[in-house]
Amino acid sequence: MRPDIDNVNNFLKKRSFTVVILGLILFGGSQLSASCQDVSIKKDDIVSQISQKQIDRYFQEIIRLSPRPPESDTFRKCRLYLVNTLKSFFLKAWEESFTASTPKGAIGMANVIAEKKGQGDRIIYLASHIDTKIIDGIEIQGANDSGSSMAALLELARVISNLNTKFTYRFVFFDGEESIGKDMNERDGLYGSKEHVRRLKSDNLISNVHAMILLDMIGDKDPVINRDLNSSPALYSLFAVCCQRLGYTNLCMGTESYMYDDHIPFLRAGIPSLDLIDFDYGPNNSFWHTEKDTAENVSIKSIFKIVQVVACMLESLERPQK
Ligand SMILES: [Zn+2]
């Protein structure tokens, strides 16, 4: 299940459109259509409980707290908002503080984590990041990157907190996904996810983690999720099946690319992981990391659809395996 990350390291460029045409011809098309036809999941609880209205409510609260560079006052307020909201669902919620060593020196960071205990000790991670990109002279509100995925995660937490689940769920909001310097590289970026995986290792919990699903930039008005070739193929196939089942065929028609995002530290630890990212925000991705990343350029309906698809995936994972 683990992709050979080390061998593809050279290709790991932050959200680049490295289209592997040969891969698409040999595997992508046939694998996807096979999985799309295998639609045997029945509709039940989780999908039907997802509320677009609630997503909108969380989103409106979050965008008031922006921009959110690490250590900013708005970041701290957003963290508090997340913890309080997660606690209002009667979830155990806490901050995971650490000091990141960045190109601009030591920066105090903190992830936000909430946990919902399941019947067993297998864990499913649902994740987003909190921080917004820092570019001198530009105010990046981060409505899509990362407001959309935080609102999505809160809605998933609200619904799942009421269910009796087989899996334990962890909802994780990472600090420091964005690089502090201009471009992301192995040493700059993914600070929160790297720190969290380090702690999972030292707590001997890696083998307990069943899957990790990361959401990032899911609020474009024309939502199409990339087929990330670093992600675990089985999880992507499940995503494609759920898109078909819910009638959102276009969602799974995204470009193939290697995404370097908060799922990478989990993949490198051997955890099956999936990055659901729409890396085409506005015409030719022109709204990404610009002042155009505002609420007007985000569609709550798009977030709603993707949350429904994730809910469908969780229904399937929760179902006893034959
Ligand atoms: Zn970003």
Image (cartoon, rainbow, N blue to C red):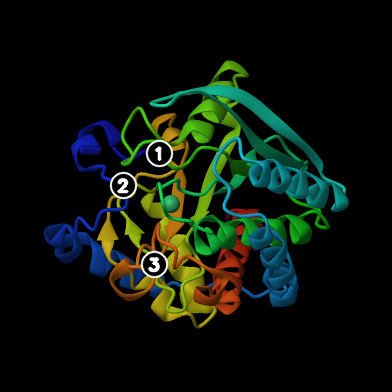
Q: Quadrant of the C terminus?
A: bottom right
- Residue holding disc 1: 179
In the rendered image, the residue lying farthest to the top is: 202
| Crowding near the residue tagged with mark 2, few <14, some 14–19, many ≥20 C-alpha atoms within 10 Å | some
User: Residue at the spot x=20%, y=55% of the render?
Assistant: 18
Can residue 50 be seen in this snapshot?
no
Query: Which numbered disc, 3 or 1, marks the residue that appears first in the sequence?
Result: 1
- Residue holding disc 2: 14
Do tag 3 and tag 2 residues touch (Cβ < 8 Å)? Answer: no
- Residue holding disc 3: 287
Horizontally, is 241 left or right of 128 in the view? left
User: Residue at the spot x=59%, y=19% of the render?
Assistant: 204
> Tag 3: residue type?
Phe
* Residue 95 x/y as whole percent: 71, 33
**Disc sitting over residue 294 in the figure:** none
Image vertical order of residue 13 relative to residue 27, above or below: above
* Residue 301 x/y as whole percent: 58, 79
Front residue of 103 and 124: 103
> Tag 2: residue type?
Lys
Horizontally, is 232 left or right of 20 in the view? right
| Element class at badge 1 | loop
| Crowding near the residue tagged with mark 1, few <14, some 14–19, many ≥20 C-alpha atoms within 10 Å | many
| Element class at badge 2 | loop
User: Residue at the spot x=46%, y=72% of the render?
Assistant: 220
> Tag 1: residue type?
Ser
Front residue of 25 and 259: 259
| Crowding near the residue tagged with mark 3, few <14, some 14–19, many ≥20 C-alpha atoms within 10 Å | some
